[in-house]
Image: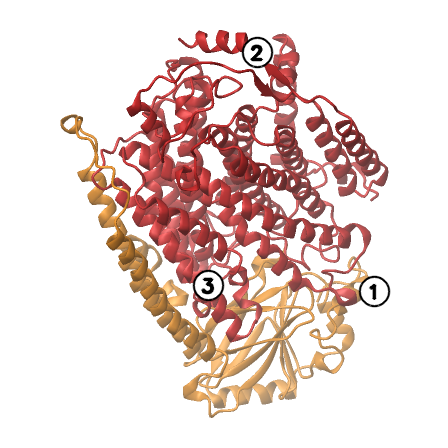
Chain colours: A red, B orange
């Protein structure tokens, strides 16, 4: 691709120039701080080369918060543009780029990594394991995700962003109608990050199947572990479909094949099918772990074991199974015959049954409990009514004949934000507040946390509830402007005000992280919430080998039972086998990034150099005979005694 | 709720203010489902409020040890069976309506439907009346009380024809022909648009629908046939260029030389041939 330099760098918008400046300044500041405090070596040794599931989890969450900020700014820009009719803040094309990156980043680079971060940190601890099954692969997962996300994000200032929506429907997203490199960032960025997600799926499936502490039978697995297990199975079945779909469109755009083109017999509708065969399970990939998180928190702060545990497990399994037979409901309007639409209407509505079961089980976990209103609990409680609104409107959308009227409107936008925000985002925040003391040895500030909660939760409702009515008033999604005559002005103003509330909530969260880092009271007994599961049985900060002695599980709520029994386990330590850190995952992923960057602009020599880099790291890994090391008993004793 | 009703004004909720039998069936289905949904939401909200108020931790209940009940068969059966019943109650009318919308509306099914081809091209609407040999751009005239059979296709990106007050949308796809019945019960002007994202000019890809009495419609047809210019291939090809345009009327149709449902790359080929810098879009 021959580009002038002003086509290479995105130009012409003051917003972009401001972003350019802030990116350069931030980069300089980071380099300066690291150099001044001589932290480069520390960063490399402790974080960039780590294979410790806890540190990887924290890095996932940090990256996800960055992405939440980026895509949140996108959202605010959209709200600014739509507040009044005929607004001139953004041009059509720029608006299209912003809603595309907003959706893609929120789903792929925010929601999933945030949850995978929490899963990484918590699940091995929850099942009494010392790490995941494949610690090296875990680092590859993180770094491919991170490099994929960075490649996608630089499209903002280099080459131009994709603008065909996060669903990237062809033929619009194809070479014939979108010849700019933007769409390539989407294809290659997601492909690289997808490697990491698939590896995570395999890694945690094996971890949960093979590495549970003795005594942890299927029906003694904590709910978060259960939901993670099922999510990983969804990932393993769904992500290969995305990989193939992305590859086919990449061939179309880079090498001139005709899978989805208008010319020469391409089948554009095939993309929609492939996309949603992945895409529908994908929304469960980001909601099932959330269900797990809420289960843990509600049970902990109601001080009751989870009501209907078995039904909860089976309903997750049912939801996961159904998630593969509902994808057509994303395009009821494609003209499939009545039998097809009827079938997919009914399967979709059936999802409401196991989901309803879960809602009532959560409610009855509260019944006769002693509910402690911590910030984590507030997020979890708020989930119940808000998610119910999102859920019932989902059933309305499932009714195909009515969906012809809702489809592509703000009714749909309201629905999926209700389920994704009050489901996934609330869960991420709840989980962050809940497990933060386990991660860092101090709680986040509860007062700031509650203020942030109320701003965000009320702001969320003020933003998205009016959108149901905007949809019924005929406002389609993805329009960058409307007219006074459309009559959508009032509700849009309300929605934008709510958006400000959510932004304040987010700022309070970030400030809370800073404030708590500086001032929060440190603790190291490791069980600040009177926890129920094994992660709370470890001291804080968790030693790198997690458990000096592998715990024995005697029932659901394993740690509650342990606390009641109070029996002193004999402390005879044995040497612990641990994996060595490695710099290969980050280097390999950087090579993927370079290769991907070359592919985006069809600069083949860069792509080839990057691929050679990937191959070299693979070969190096193959001939790497480092099989880890043993932590000797004396060192374990020294570390364990330090906690007393 | 009332505030929102006030802010919009109920008549502004186009979907709930149908002007034809298709949109009316959809509105009935929506209202039916809203009833059940309000019931579910009420049950959940009431239990939720009761439980968090009643069982909240307070200084006086600090010694209270909650019972560790693992579940309750009867309750769990209830909240499985009731949703099953609700799903059945929603599925039956849904399936019925899905099948009903495949046919012309019952009340007027004895009338011959008027066939109109609706073709989307970035970012315009081309309407073709094959029997009347009329073609219009960005506006429609239809007779009231007569089913209209739209045959939908697209010259490039996937669009969706949507006239909220007359009924739900359906995709226009290049290389495909989809069908949808709509009908207006009373004369009036209705807004129509593309509801499916098609890129830069998507927001303005709109059209107006004028529903008229049978006599007025026939008069419009005759006048158009007599006075509108013929559509030439050259003019039509310029319509294929990306961009917006006003309303246009012709007394012949493009179906003579191209059917986009069979030639999905027609517009792409035309764009390669024409120079978008010199050949102004129509």
Left or right of residue A304, residue A513 in this image: right
Task: Tell me: residue A555, above or below residue B198.
Answer: above
Q: Are marks 2 and 1 on the same chain?
A: no
Depth check: B173 or A80 in front? B173
Q: Toward which corner of the image does residue A538 lie, by quadrant?
A: top left
Looking at the image, which residue is at 84% across and 41% down? A604
Which chain is disc 1 placed on?
A: B
Q: Are marks 2 and 3 on the same chain?
A: yes
Indicate which disc residue B273 carries.
1
Residue farthest toward the left in the current orientation of the protein: B60
Badge 1 local density, few (<14 within 10 Å), some, or many (20+)?
few
Which chain is disc 2 placed on?
A: A
Query: Where is residue A115 shown, x and y percent of the image?
Result: 50, 37
For marks 2 and 3, the one nearer the N-term is 3
Looking at the image, which residue is at 63% across and 38% down? A199
Query: Where is residue A563 shown, x and y percent of the image?
Result: 31, 23
Which chain is disc 3 placed on?
A: A
Looking at the image, which residue is at 30% across and 63% down? B36
- Residue to which mark 3 is pinned: A347
Task: Tell me: residue A84, above or below residue A366.
Answer: below
**Is residue A473 in view?**
no
Query: Where is residue A640 shown, x and y percent of the image?
Result: 46, 11
Give the Cα distance between marks 2 and 1. Answer: 76 Å
- Residue to which mark 2 is pinned: A632
């Amino acid at each position: 691709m021959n580009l002038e330099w002003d086509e290479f760098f995105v130009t012409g918008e003051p917003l972009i120039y401001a972003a350019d400046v802030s990116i350069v300044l931030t980069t300089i500041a980071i380099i300066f701080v690291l150099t001044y405090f001589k932290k480069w070596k520390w960063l490399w040794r402790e974080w960039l080369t780590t294979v410790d599931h806890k540190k990887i989890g924290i890095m996932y969450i940090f990256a996800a918060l960055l992405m939440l900020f980026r895509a949140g700014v996108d959202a605010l820009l959209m709200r600014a543009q739509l507040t009044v009719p005929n607004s001139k803040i953004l041009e059509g094309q720029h608006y299209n780029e912003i809603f595309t990156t907003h959706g893609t980043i929120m789903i792929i680079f925010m929601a999933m990594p945030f949850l995978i971060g929490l899963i990484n940190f918590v699940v091995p601890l929850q099942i009494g394991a010392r790490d995941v099954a494949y610690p090296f692969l875990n680092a590859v997962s993180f770094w491919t995700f991170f490099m994929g996300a960075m490649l996608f994000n630089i499209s903002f200032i280099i080459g131009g962003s994709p603008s065909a929506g996060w669903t990237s429907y062809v033929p619009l997203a194809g070479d014939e109608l979108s010849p700019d490199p933007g769409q390539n960032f989407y294809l290659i960025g997601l492909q690289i990050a997808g490697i990491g997600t698939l590896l995570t799926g395999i890694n945690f499936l094996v971890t949960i199947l093979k590495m549970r502490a003795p005594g942890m039978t299927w029906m003694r697995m904590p709910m978060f572990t259960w939901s993670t297990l099922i999510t990983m199975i969804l990932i393993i079945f769904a992500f290969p479909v995305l990989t193939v779909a992305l590859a086919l469109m990449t061939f179309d755009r880079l090498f001139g094949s005709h899978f989805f083109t208008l010319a020469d017999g391409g089948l554009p509708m095939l993309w929609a099918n492939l996309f949603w065969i992945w895409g529908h399970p994908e929304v469960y990939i980001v909601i099932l772990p959330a269900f797990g998180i809420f289960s843990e928190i509600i049970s902990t702060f109601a001080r009751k074991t989870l009501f209907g545990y078995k039904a909860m497990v089976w309903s997750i399994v049912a939801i996961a199974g159904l998630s593969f037979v509902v994808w057509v409901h994303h395009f009821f309007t494609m003209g499939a015959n009545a039998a097809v639409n009827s079938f997919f209407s009914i399967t979709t509505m059936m999802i409401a049954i196991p989901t309803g079961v879960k809602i009532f089980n959560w409610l009855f976990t509260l019944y006769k409990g002693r509910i402690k209103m911590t910030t984590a609990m507030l997020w979890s409680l708020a989930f119940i009514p808000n998610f119910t609104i999102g859920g019932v409107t989902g059933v309305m959308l499932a009714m195909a004949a009515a969906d012809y009227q809702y489809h592509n409107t703000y009714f749909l936008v309201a629905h999926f934000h209700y389920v994704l925000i009050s489901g996934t985002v609330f869960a991420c925040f709840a989980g962050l507040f809940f497990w933060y003391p386990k991660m860092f040895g101090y709680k986040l500030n509860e007062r700031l946390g509650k203020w942030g909660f109320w701003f965000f939760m009320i702001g969320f409702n003020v933003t998205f509830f009016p959108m149901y009515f905007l949809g019924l008033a005929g406002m389609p999604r993805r329009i960058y402007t409307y007219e006074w005559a459309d009559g959508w002005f009032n509700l849009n103003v309300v929605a934008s005000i709510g958006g400000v509330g959510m932004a304040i909530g987010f700022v309070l969260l970030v400030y809370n992280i800073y404030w708590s880092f500086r001032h929060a009271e440190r603790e190291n007994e490791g069980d600040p919430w009177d926890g129920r599961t094994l992660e709370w049985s470890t001291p804080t900060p968790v030693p790198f080998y997690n458990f000096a002695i592998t715990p024995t599980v005697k029932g659901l709520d394993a740690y509650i039972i342990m606390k009641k029994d109070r029996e002193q386990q004999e402390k005879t330590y044995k040497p612990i086998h641990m994996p060595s850190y490695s710099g290969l995952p980050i280097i390999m992923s950087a090579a993927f990034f370079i290769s991907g960057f070359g592919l985006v602009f069809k600069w083949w020599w860069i792509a080839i150099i990057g691929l050679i880099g990937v191959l070299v790291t693979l070969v190096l890994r193959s001939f790497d005979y480092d099989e880890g090391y043993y932590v000797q008993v004396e060192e374990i004793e020294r570390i364990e005694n330090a906690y007393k | 709720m009332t505030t929102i009703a006030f802010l919009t004004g109920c008549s502004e909720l186009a979907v709930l203010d149908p002007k034809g039998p298709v949109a009316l069936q959809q509105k009935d289905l929506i209202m039916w489902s809203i009833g059940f949904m309000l019931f579910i939401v009420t049950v959940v909200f009431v239990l939720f409020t009761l439980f968090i108020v009643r069982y909240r931790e307070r200084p006086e209940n600090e010694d209270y040890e909650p019972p560790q009940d693992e579940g309750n068969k009867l309750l769990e059966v209830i909240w499985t069976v009731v949703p099953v019943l609700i799903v059945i109650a929603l599925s039956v009318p849904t399936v019925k309506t899905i099948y009903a919308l495949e046919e012309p509306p019952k009340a007027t099914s004895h009338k011959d439907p008027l066939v109109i081809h609706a073709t989307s091209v970035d970012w315009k609407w081309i309407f073709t009346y094959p029997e009347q040999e009329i073609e219009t751009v960005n506006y429609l005239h239809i007779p009231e009380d007569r089913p209209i059979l739209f045959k939908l296709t697209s010259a490039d990106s996937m669009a969706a024809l949507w006239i909220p007050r007359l009924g739900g949308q359906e995709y226009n796809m290049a290389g495909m022909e989809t069908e949808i019945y709509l009908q207006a019960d009373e004369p009036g002007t209705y807004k129509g648009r593309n509801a499916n994202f098609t890129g830069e000019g998507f927001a303005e890809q709109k059209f107006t629908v004028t529903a008229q009495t049978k006599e007025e419609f026939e008069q419009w047809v005759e006048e158009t046939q007599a006075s509108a210019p013929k559509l030439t291939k050259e003019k039509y090809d310029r319509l294929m260029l990306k961009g917006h345009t006003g309303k246009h009327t012709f007394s012949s149709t493009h179906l003579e030389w191209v059917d986009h449902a069979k030639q999905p790359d027609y517009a792409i080929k035309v764009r390669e041939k024409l120079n978008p810098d010199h050949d102004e879009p129509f």
